[in-house]
Image (cartoon, coloured by chain):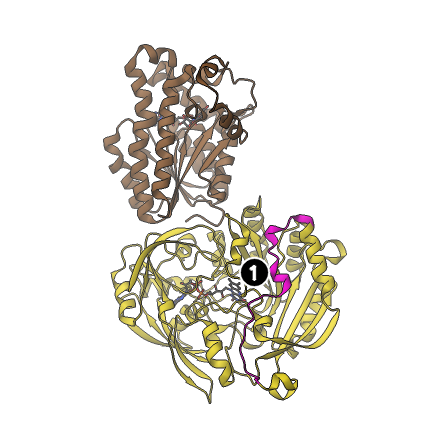
Chain colours: A yellow, B brown
Amino acid sequence: MSVDTVSLTGWGRTAPTAALRFRPRSYEEAAATVRGCGPRGSIARGLGRAHGDAAQNAGGSVLDMTALNRVRTIDAGTGTVVCDAGVSLHRLMEVLLPLGWFVPVTPTTRYVTVGGAIGADIHGHNQHVSGSFSRHVQELELLTAGGEIRTVRSGTSLFDATAGGLGLTGVILSATLRCHRVTSSWMSVDTERAVDLDDLLERLCAGDHRYRYSAAWIDLRARGRATGRSVLTRGEHVPRYALPARARRTPLAFRPGPLPTAPALVPEALLGGTPAALFNEVRYRGAPRYRIGELQRLAAFFHPLDGLPQWSRAHGRAGSVRYQFVVGHGREEALRRIVHRLSRRRCPSSNAVLKRFGTGDPGWLSFPVPGWTLALDLPAALPGLARFLDSLDEEVAAAGGRVCLAKDSRLRPELLAAMYPRLADFRSLRAELDPDGAFRSDLSRRLSL
Amino acid sequence: MKDAFGAPQSLLVLGGTSEIALATARRLIALRTRTVRLAGRPSPALDAAAAELRARGADVRTVDFDALDSASHETTLGKVFAEGDIDMVLLAFGIAGDQGRDEEEPLAAVRVAQTNYTGAVSAGLVCAGALQAQGHGSLVVLSSVAGERVRRADFIYGSSKAGLDAFAQGLGDALHGTGAHVMVVRPGVVRPEPRAEAGAVRVAGATQAAGVVQGAGAVRAAARFVSAPLEASPLTTTPDAVAEAIVTGLRRRSETVWVPGSLRAVMSALRHVPRPLFRRLPI
Ligand SMILES: Cc1cc2nc3c(=O)[nH]c(=O)nc-3n(C[C@H](O)[C@H](O)[C@H](O)COP(=O)(O)OP(=O)(O)OC[C@H]3O[C@@H](n4cnc5c(N)ncnc54)[C@H](O)[C@@H]3O)c2cc1C
Ligand SMILES: NC(=O)c1ccc[n+]([C@@H]2O[C@H](COP(=O)([O-])OP(=O)(O)OC[C@H]3O[C@@H](n4cnc5c(N)ncnc54)[C@H](OP(=O)(O)O)[C@@H]3O)[C@@H](O)[C@H]2O)c1
């Protein structure tokens, strides 16, 4: 097992801290690392795609899980997969698609591990239909504080603490997933433009149930009557029979192109205010007012940014902050206020996404609850950003909403309990399961999880 | 832990009555700081400073600390770190000395050097070791523009700051990659705000009283340093401006911060002025 001292950050490249990084290749090595971790504890880390400090542990141990990357069994009949926690969703797509299966939930990057997907209980553009990742996990193997390995079944309280538990209940070693049946690797995509926020919300309410995948890019630079104008993109897997003849020859091929789509190529941080607004203008005007049935490859539809390695560097030395919150249905007023405040501030965020969430999942710290979620990236160097986001937190909390912890790097700890009502249960389960704090992260210290 | 903007949750101030340090602590408490430890020589001024910060909502305690007693630093500061992580250490102690008297009384000059340099070396190393062990944290060192190019008018103070500055830079390089970070702050002449808040005035007054008791000349000398020829220059600044620059520096993870920022350009020119000419400059 390799060991080195490294300075780590999340994808946002803020708040670096140093830790001893272990790279276990077997359960035994992982268990030995957890047993041998000092007073500063240990934390699992996947591909480091969490935006904030969830997968770092200053002065302690970090278990880089990416060497535990075997896909153990695939039941091609039922779509049940057993794999190590360090397997990436990219890898799963490579092996599953030819067999006619797709991962149950994918974030907008394929480069996350199964362990990270459970630890952050990630959601995708199909959240309103399929819930978050852990809904599709039947059971998992968890390495707990004493170094023993437990099989944790869905529906137990340890499972609910672990799903979205940010690695703080233990190290997930493997998981049994149920996948989604597909007959091609193509997507049929419908695009429409919404002239303002209300228009968008209406369209989402009216049409979402007809699509498996749905999300909208929202132009946060637009002001006045155009505030909240958006491009809504919704898609379905295309059945094989509906493919054009050429595509039907290799219907399940998975060939993620190396180049991302044009809008993703322009990092907003490189743009000043006016060009950024202009760019958004072009992106909005360039989108079809209404188009149905456009064929797109999977990777282009789900992961437009994955072709650009290290694009997170575009925000410069100070890095970036990802802000994602959700407020419930009936709280549209709060959403409107926040969108208006963001546009009035002319926030340089060209990749803001608004989505309508459906039923949430039982994970105690799992993020999704039914309602409206907005996610955006902002350069951390933006003057006054810290206070501005604090004030958004207040609005979100007052509306009974919450911010997403897997992306967080800055929340005021005092607000946490209001946002996550199961926090007390989470804390007491940890106190019982892990009294000496074998599992800690920078995030758990910052927020006193 | 620090957040994405570099705002610490816990702060240790060495030189707990320093005006610059207190201005910084106030700003940080308004952001994320909840725990403050004020290390300094016990005095009513230190207690008053703690009370003022406490009123702003932080958990504040004072710690007995004398920069001149290097042998005790390991124990005193070690105890603070043993209680919990410190996200930021602000090394703010320092004395200006009295150039005239110090030239006549070598032992007084040595006291300036020992406080500003030797004391900072031992305290700095102890803190650096602790920050390295916890894998994160910033050591913010209040150096001075006076150490950048040492002047005839205050070379005793200036040379002590030059030593401190060089030490802090080297320490920053030594800590690179360990998660700990050193930020050297070089203020110009710092003067209290013209319309300081009531709290700040009280603390400043108390500092002066303590100073008079401990070494009559020091405060006068500081006053003289302050009213040195840079008087009307735009290169003077205020404790609050220094505090703001520190907060910005933390956000950017800067290694060097000049306050005001224009000093960077001024000093890079001044640094290259030939000695014969420099001696005659009215600065
Ligand atoms: C471009 C981009 C787009 C994204 N889009 C989405 C999105 O659409 N929806 C969404 O929900 N998220 C999204 N994310 C966030 C990302 O999906 C999650 O942060 C995910 O957890 C990252 O997985 P990872 O393997 O990189 O984990 P890391 O970032 O390394 O770790 C994340 C958390 O999981 C824990 N963890 C990792 N492995 C294990 C393990 N084996 N056992 C226990 N705990 C573990 C860590 O301790 C940490 O708390 C996006 C991120 C990026 C960079
Ligand atoms: N003011 C300026 O114009 C200026 C300009 C550039 C740089 N600086 C530097 O910035 C720092 C802070 O400046 P300031 O204006 O805030 O200073 P200040 O208000 O005069 O405070 C100086 C602090 O140092 C402490 N101190 C002195 N000797 C000590 C010792 N032996 N042990 C422990 N603490 C000791 C003092 O504590 P007591 O209360 O016990 O005396 C006081 O807390 C200093 O290092 C100074 O050199 C100042």
The three-letter amino acid code for the residue at tag 1 is Phe
The rendered magenta stretch, by its main secondary structure, is classed as loop
The quarter of the picture where the N terminus of chain A appears is bottom left
Q: How many other residues sit within 10 Å of disc 1, few (<14), some (14-19) or many (≥20)?
A: many
Quadrant placement of the C terminus of chain A: bottom left
Q: Classify residue B66 by image quadrant.
A: top left
Whole-percent x, y for residue A35 in the image: 25, 63
**Residue B113 percent coordinates (x, y):** 32, 23
In the rendered image, is residue A354 in sight? yes
User: Looking at the image, is A428 positioned above or below residue B28?
Assistant: below
The residue under label 1 is: A325
| Residue A232 point in image, percent of width and height | 67, 68
Q: Position of residue B231 (x, y in %)?
A: 53, 17
B3 relative to A189 in the view: left or right: left
Instruction: Examine the rendered structure and indicate whether residue B115 appears above or below residue A148.
Output: above
Q: Nearer the viewer, residue A94 or A287?
A: A94
- Figure disc tally: 1
Residue B129 as seen in the image, left or right of residue A135: left
Q: Is A88 in the magenta?
A: no
Extent of the magenta region: A250-274
The chain to which mark 1 is attached is: A
Q: Is residue A395 left or right of residue A71?
A: right
Q: Nearer the viewer, residue A59 or A158?
A: A59
Label 1 within 8 A of ligand 1 by Cβ: no
Residue A321 vs B34, above or below: the answer is below
Residue A267 within the magenta-colored segment of the rendering: yes
- Residue A351: which quarter of the image? bottom right
Confirm whether residue A239 shows in the render.
no
Secondary structure found at label 1: strand
